[in-house]
Structure formats: C-alpha cells, structure tokens
Image (cartoon, helix red, strand yellow):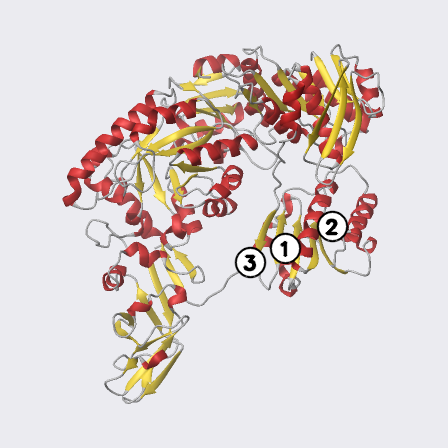
Amino acid sequence: MSYAIESIAKSIGARRVGEYETTIDWLLTDSRSLSFPEETLFFALATKRNSGARYIPDLYDRGVRNFVVSEEDFKEIESGEWGVESSLNFLVVPNPLKALQKLAEVHREKFKMPVIGITGSNGKTIVKEWLHQLLSPDRCIVRSPRSYNSQIGVPLSVWQLNEEAELGIFEAGISEMGEMGALKRMIKPTIGILTNIGGAHQENFFSLQEKCMEKLTLFKDCDVVIYNGDNELISNCVAKSMLTAREIAWSRTDIERPLHISRVTKKEDHTVISYRYLDMDNTFCIPFIDDASIENALNCLAACLYLMTPADQITERMARLEPIAMRLEVKEGKNNCVLINDSYNSDLASLDIALDFLVRRSEKKGLNRTLILSDILETGQSTATLYRRVAQLVQSRGINKLIGVGPEISSCATRFDAGIERYFFPNTEALLASDVLKSLHSEVILIKGSRIFNFDKVSEALELKVHETILEVNLHAMVENLNHYRSMLRHPETKMICMVKASAYGAGSYEIAKTLQEHHVDYLAVAVADEGSELRKAGITSSIMIMDPELTAFKTMFDYKLEPEVYNFHLLDALIKAAKKEGITNFPIHIKLDTGMHRLGFAVEDIPLLIHRLKNQSAVIPRSVFSHFVGSDSPQFDAFTRRQIELFEKGSQELQAAFPHKILRHICNTAGIERFPGAQFDMVRLGIGLYGVSPIDNSIIHNVSTLKTTILQIRDVSEEDTVGYSRMGHLTRPSRIAAIPIGYADGLNRHLGRGNAYCLVNGKKAAYVGNICMDVCMIDVTDIDCREGDQVIIFGDDLPITVLSDKLDTIPYEVLTSISTRVKRVYYQE
C-alpha cells in the first residue's frame, strides 16, 4: 500500500521539515537493503554502536528523499555541512524506532483478516514456513521475511500487509521483559502459537516461567491459542495468564484435550502421526524423524484444523513438507582441509547441529575433526555449567582438536578431555597471530562462533593465496573514466550501473566496488551470486545486480540481498518457488527483454504472460527492465540499434503500465551512452569504458590496469642454442635471455610467444622468446641495460592493452579478464 508522506507524518506524530510531495511504499532501516529509493522512507535508528543518521548523505545520493530522524540527529544535520533542502522530507520524532512501530500499528489496523502470531524459544521460523507451505495453495499469505521477529523486524514484516492478503503469519521474538507489548500491538494476532520455552536469551529473565509469561502477552486478545498441552511449564503459565482465548492444547497423553495425538511412529525416514480432533480420527506422515520437527508439525496441524483445512489436504501437504535451509557454509580449505563456516550464532542447540554435520562430513572424507569455537554468549547459564555441557558434546562427537577463542572458554580449558589436542586464545587476533592455523592439515574444520568474534577472518586466513606477479590498479584513473561517461548523461538524475563482474574485468572486484560505492554509483553488476556475496562479506552495501543467476544460487542471493536478472519463465518460476520457501516477499528482480541479441531474454510478445505471472505472486517484484544492444559501437549497425530501441520502448512501457511502482528502464552499454544519448532512459550500464578502453575505437581513455613482474634470472645463450619447450625459441645471434615469473596460468596468452609480442624492460621492447610456459616465460634483453630484479611491464600506460588484444585478434575484455586470481592486485590513488 502507498501512503502520502503527509499522512505518515500525522500517523507517527512527526514534525515535517521539507516540502517534497511523494508517496511511500517501502520502509528502510538498513541502507544495504535499498532497492526503490524513490518510494522509500528511511528510519535513522540508533544502536549502541552506530547511528542510522550517518547513512543519510549516502542514501540521498542514491535517490532517497524521505527520512525519519530523532530531534538530536536533526539538530546535527541542520548545523552540519550537508544541510537541509526543500527537495526532501525529514520527519522529526523523539524516537525513530517507536515511530516505525507506531506506523506499523496504524497500518495493521486497516486489515481484518486472520493473523497468526508465533512466539517461543525455538521453532518459530520453521512453524511459520511450514504453515505457509500447508496453507498457501488456498490463501494469499503475507508472512515475516526470514527471522524478522525483533522490535525492528516485526514492523517491517507487518508493513507488507496489502489488500490482497487473506492471512498474515508473523514471528515475535524477545530477549528481555517488557518487549512483547510493542510486538503485540503491531501484530494483533487472532491466532496464537507458542512453540516451546527454552534457554535462549535467558540472561535477561529471572526464570523460564517469567519468560513464558512475557511471551504469552502476545496472545492477550487472540481468538485461539495453540500450544503443547503436555508441557507443564507452558500449561501452568497459560492458566495463570487468564487468557480469554479458546485453547487448542494438543496432547499425546490426555485424551480429553481438543487435539489428541493418539500415535507417533518413527520410521527410517519419516514419521506417521495419528490424531483425533472433533471426534474424527485421521493420520498423516511427515518426512522427518526428529522430535523438534514432530512438535513443530503438531503446532502446524492445530492451526490448519482451526482454519478448517480439510483433513485430506493436511495429509497430502504434510507429506510434502520441505526442510528449512541451514546456514552452514562448506568451503575448500588449503592443505587438504574442508572448512565448515557457521559463524552466525553460538548456542548449544546450534552447536550440536553443526557438530553432527561435521561428523558426517569427516566420515565421508576420512579426515580428522577440528572445532574452532568462540565463547557462547547470552545463555543465562553459569560458565562452569555451560562449558561442562560443551565438553560433553565435544567428547561425544569425537573431536580430535579443539581451538577455543574467548576468555570464558579459555577459563574452562581443564573441563575438556585431555585426550584431545587443545589450544585456547583470549581473542581472534591472538589466534590469527599464532601458528596454529598454519599447522592444520587434512582436517574437516568447523568454525563456530558468535558474530562479534569475526570468525570470517579465520576462514579467510585458511584460504589465503599468494603470488609474485602483480596487477597495479589506478583507482584515480578509474574514477576519471567514471566521470568521463557521467559527463555524457543528458539528465543528472539518470542512474548508472557499473560492471564489476569477472573480478571487475580482472582488476579485483572489492577495491573497485568500494571506490565506486564511495563515488555513489547506483548499482554494481556481477555475473554470478558468489561474486556478489564476496562483495557483501567485504562490506559493500551498494545495490548489486546478478547478470547470470544460477538456479543453485538463490539462497546466496537472498542471504546477501543480490538482485538477479530474470530472462525466462523457467528461471522466474524457480526463483519465485525458492523465495516462497525462504519466506521472502518483494525480492527485487531485473527483467531482461530480447530485442535482437537472441542470447537471453523474454520476447516482447511474452510480456502479457509475464505480467500475469508477476502480478499473481508476491515473492518477487520487478525493479528494472532492460535489454542488450547488439552493435551500438559501430555505425554499420545503427539502423538495427534504432529498431532495438523502438522494440525495447514498446515492451518496457507495456510492463510499466501494469505496475504502480517505478520500474527503471535501461538499454545503453558503454558505447550506447556515447552514441545513443536519446536511449539513456532511467539508467545506463558502464562496462569496459570504466576500465579505460573506448569500445568505439579501442582508444585508451585513462589507463587503469598495469600488469608487471620482475626479472628472475638473466643468462647468455649462444646463437646455436634454443630457448624453451620443444626448442621453439630459435636465436639469430648470441643473446641475453631473461626469465620472468609470469605464464599462461597467470593470463599471459600462449600465442604471444615466439616473438609475436613484446613487453617493456626499462622502457625498451623485449620480445617473448620461445613458447610461453605455465608459470614462466623468457624474453630477449640483449640490447637492454637491465639486471635481475628489474621491473617488466606486460601492459600499462606505455604499452596499451590494445597492443596485446590486436596481436591476439581479440578484444581488450578478454585480455583483462584472463588475468589469474593468483596474480596479486595492488591498488593506488594518484
């Protein structure tokens, strides 16, 4: 739903500063999640370590014009260099978080459909996602994305409610007393589900009973409450809460309960469950055998029965329940190691799951088991009790080596079995400074820790790559190229996508992306999701487009907020299915139209069906529509290019007309920016020009990359001898031959050998002699004053990359992107 900015200001009791008239569709609290700046309202939330107000200038440059700020932050904005303009809006409030929650309350009041509120210590997300799997075939459902169950996540979830919604399903999670009241006012559930009560976040509660009573606050005005009637703690708390709601307390022991579970039979790979409800007996099975899944399924059963889902549908759909994806990442490590990275949280339950995964991995590969474990935080248990249980888990899982990080686990070192190899460090920096990681060999290594321990650094240390030859990258020159093409834009509001795929055309994606982000480009584009996830891990917050999304990489895209190109119905349907499974809604996608390239893209005649598919789901939403020029760099194809523009204009207008929100249009590549300014539309895509090469005439604009190495050895070779493999290096005179540490494994094309090309040594041309080898090649330095250790330029300012590409009868793209990842990148600013 859209709200006028003035309406929002009144709803949250804000003082409005600014006169920018607009409507709001999207709420934002994390600048990394920005997708639709034109219709976004940013809440500048304050945390213990950060302030959202810091990101306002960057968001403004990225197109956001509406901000909710505190009185204190607004005073700093008014007095600072950035200033306040009339072309935007500040909604000034005492507390932006409370304003966000109030807006969610107002929005929730507009809807009268059933809403399921789920709380508990474990299983909330699984119950929510399984309910969606069980109920969505018959209903339009809005549900919390992922684990959006906090004071910030809940209002963002509730905001997704719209006129089409027939059922809402929202999680509510708390970590201390007094938090549930705010969540209850936003969710206003009519159906409540309490999953269980455990020790997570127990440190802020006097007892489990106190925590349970706080959680039951969510259900104060519910029509029905669902819970495990066999759980004595929960049953007692429900009785004390004096809820007015009807109770569906399912039980495996009490036949008088409304929902009696008469039999649970675990098979090899599934569980058969029989039950009686309203004097009717039925049976279903689930494809799981663990107790947690059985309890979660019974909570879902009760909700389905209350919503009058036919028993035969429940039976059919329960059998097809899909597991909720785990977050364990498996990576190749050096020294024949396998890395399992689970540095997202650190509690006993998830440690047990991760250790089980470790055991199965190590059994398959026959490798030793190593656990790198940080302090486990916020459990509410005493240190001694906690690490006694951790030690029991470590011993029962057959861990061969334990590396403990943190003061608490280090203080309990003696609790761990003396029969295993043990190391303890006060912090991650001490571990990285030691030699322990270097000694790991032929092991499956579980890296398990709380986020604050930054165990990603441990994972990176186990994957390091080193090589001598370097690629120097001039970031200042790249910015000059960016500004060169920005100067060609007809309208300053035209957005720009910068291509950083293929490791930023060989230049190294992180530093390039970081620099582009600092210069406020609107989008970065990479080929595959792994490229995008690496940028996210490195701290890149700009919007990232995935140009070649793989069906196996959807989870990576969801996890790291990477926006895929979608070019056919097969990909679209698979993406929608995956997003639904993950609990994701309104995930931005970029629609590709085929206007003549005939490589990838929807045909223009497919657009009516495409619109139908998009409008009948809520998992994804089109952020842009684009196409690809075939020959914008050459005048001989201009007539064809103009036909492409006409076809794209027709197709993109048809798509836009079907949706109320702004869909960005873009077709211009680097050459198109320069040669077809009338087709710049809302956005353009800058590729090879960013890296200094004009695609129109192959001229160098500002050289960005210089590939250089050094002379390893110089030897005198007689005229009669040959140089290199297969004796292909024939000499015509006594020669001085230098060996340099670069070969075809580094990206130096083998066809440049045998005198077909040259490099520069101390400014002089030195021809390649003989065949180029994998790691080394030889050059003729007979007439050059040089010595071992002197610098050699493969391409750069004085030897344009186009010299090599012309010799190879190819394009500069190929030469740049062929530079191996083992070549070290060095970045500098002039």
Of badges 2 and 3, the one in the foreground is: 3
Does label 2 or label 3 sit earlier along the sequence?
Answer: 2
Q: Quadrant of residue 703?
A: bottom left
Secondary structure at numbered mark 2 = helix
Q: Which residue is mark 3?
A: 463
Q: Amino acid at mark 1?
A: Glu
Q: Is residue 732 left or right of residue 381?
A: left
User: Mark 3, residues whose alpha carbon is within 10 Å: few (<14), some, or many (≥20)?
Assistant: some
Does the rendering let one see residue 209?
A: yes
Q: Quadrant of residue 507?
A: bottom left
Q: CA distance from mark 1 to mark 2?
A: 13 Å
Q: How many marks?
A: 3
Q: CA distance from mark 2 to mark 3?
A: 26 Å
Q: CA distance from mark 1 to mark 3?
A: 17 Å
Residue 451's label in the rendered image is none
621, 604: nearer the viewer? 604
Q: Which residue is mark 2?
A: 407
Secondary structure at numbered mark 1 = helix
